[in-house]
Amino acid sequence: MDRLRDTLDDLLKTDVIKPVKEPTTWVNSLVITEKKDKNKLRVCLDPTDLNKAILRQHYLITTADEVLCKLSEKKIFSVLDEKDGYWQIKLDKESSFLCTFNTPWGRYRFKRLPFGIKSASEVFQQRNCEKFGDIAGVHIIADDMITAASTEQEHDEILHNVMTRAKEANVKFNKDKLQ
């Protein structure tokens, strides 16, 4: 229980969740899983009922096979992983209240896109394509960005463009997962 409380406190401090005192239309159950780092927990919604009511936007999710076809002539690659990718997307107030969940210490609502929402992957993919998709040599699959170039100079230029755009858009990458 202490680990869950600590995780919720961290999410409050980082502005991912907010306490809810007023009545809400939806209250979801909380799902907790361990991250690969066994000291950390991942907090998710169980939005089974909410997902039935969500109108899903359809946005094409790029597959690994589609990207691999485009990489055959390239020699230098990097893979960038967005840190807490979904949580980089702010929810509007109405959507935030739909993402209210129960805990032993009261109700909270996600202020950022939570895991478990059936349209989250499409929303996330579209956001990434809008922010980075026009940079030549960048291929996006969910929270991973693959940069591919023929020369080291071209690769460095692509990375510079990605980092500049990421800074402008306040997108963070997971330094432990950079390849």
Image (cartoon, helix red, strand yellow):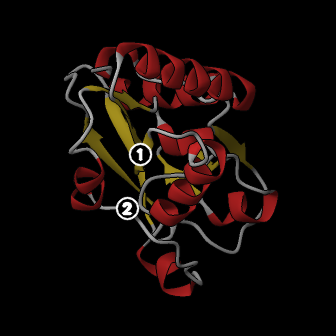
Quadrant of the rendered structure where residue 15 is?
top right
Residue flagged by tag 2: what amino acid is it? Thr
In the image, is 32 to the left or to the right of 137? left
Which one is in front, 3 or 17?
Answer: 17
The secondary structure type at the circle numbered 2 is loop
State the quadrant of the C terminus. Answer: top left
Please state the horizontal and vertical placement of residue 87, each as a whole percent of the image. Answer: 56, 41
Work out whether mark 2 precedes mark 1 in sequence or the reverse, and give the earlier one: 2
Q: Which residue is mark 2?
A: 62
Q: Is residue 123 above or below residue 91?
A: below
Verify CB contact (< 8 Å) between mark 2 and mark 1. Answer: yes
Tally of numbered discs: 2
In the image, is 163 to the left or to the right of 60? right
Quadrant of the rendered structure where residue 137 is?
top left
At x 31% / y 24%, what residue is drawn?
A: 40
Please state the horizontal and vertical placement of residue 100, each as a whole percent of the image. Answer: 61, 58
The secondary structure type at the circle numbered 1 is strand
Q: Is residue 59 above or below residue 87?
A: below
At x 57% / y 61%, what residue is drawn?
A: 123
Q: Which residue is mark 1?
A: 139
- Does residue 98 show up? yes
